Amino acid sequence: FYIDSPNGVMLESIDLFFATKDSKVNVEVIVVECENGYPSERMIPFSRVSIAPEDVQVVSFEDAKAGVAPVATNFKFETPIYLAPNTEYAFIVIAPSYNYELYTSTLGAADLSNNGIGIREQPYIGSMFKSQNLRTWSAEQLSDIKFCIHKYVYDTTKTATAMFDVVYDDWTDEEGLVHKSFKTAMQTLAVNS
């Protein structure tokens, strides 16, 4: 996925949609930069999220064909993840198990949510890749993973005022030089509308 926002974005979480899961093995998501259109090994700091099988939401392919909508499994990052502007990224789903299956769409295949009518266009510009070692990637040009990316939206019309207590600390080293330093401690924080 490509970040075209001029200031970048702060990523909150990624929703993925599973048809099957493992009963014992966690599934992970990481976000990496892309290089020449392919996922690289440059992981974005704090972007690794692991979810236990009991927290993975599943709607089987059979239930989806019967009209049950797939349910999102949310991979929430422990801290906002900054993604720079004009940069291509990929999220990677990792599980040492063949029992996890994600919902995908493939051009020309039947759309489970649209009475089996063929899929005529890709829902998102980008490519799906597969790898067995997280280094060598094969592009799946006609397929896409069903996902939703959540970013933080900040109200830039509000201002904030922070008040600090400043403590000055003068000290002399072994050579007789006097050093002046200070420490700060948060006193109050007020957000104004």
Image: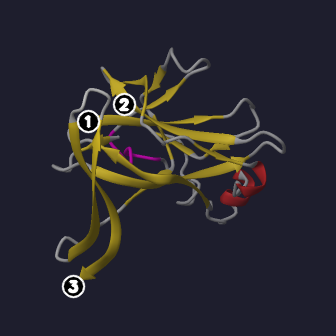
Identify the residue at image location x=75%, y=45%.
21
Q: Amino acid at mark 2?
A: Glu
Are discs 2 and 1 less than 8 Å apart at CB? Answer: yes
Left-right relation of 134 to 152: right
Q: Which of the marked residues, 2 or 1, is nearer the chain's N terminus?
A: 2
Identify the residue at horizontal 37%, vertical 30% (top origin).
Answer: 33
Residue 123 belongs to magenta span: yes
Helix, strand or loop for disc 1: strand
Secondary structure mostly seen in magenta is: loop
The residues bearing labels 3 and 2 have C-alpha atoms spaced at a distance of: 36 Å
Q: Which residue in the protein does label 1 denote?
A: 87
The N terminus lies in which quarter of the figure? top left
Q: Amino acid at mark 1?
A: Thr
- Tell me the residue at 55%/47% (across/down): 110
User: Is residue 48 or residue 36 the one in the foreground?
Assistant: 48
Q: Is residue 105 left or right of residue 89?
A: right
Residue 3 picture location, percent across and down: 27, 44
Compared with 44, 41 (above or below) is above
Task: Name the disc covering residue 33, or none.
Answer: 2
Q: Is residue 143 above or below residue 113?
A: above
Q: Which residues are magenta?
A: 119-125
Q: Nearer the viewer, mark 3 or mark 2?
A: 3
Residue shown at 74% from the left, 31% from the top: 98
How many marks on residues? 3
Residues marked 1 and 3 touching at CB (< 8 Å) = no
Looking at the image, is mark 1 or mark 3 earlier in the sequence? 1
Upstream in sequence: badge 3 or badge 2: 2
The amino acid pointed to by label 3 is Ser
**Horizontal side, residue 168 vs residue 64: left or right:** left
Identify the mark at residue 193; answer none if there is no mark.
3
- Element class at badge 2: strand
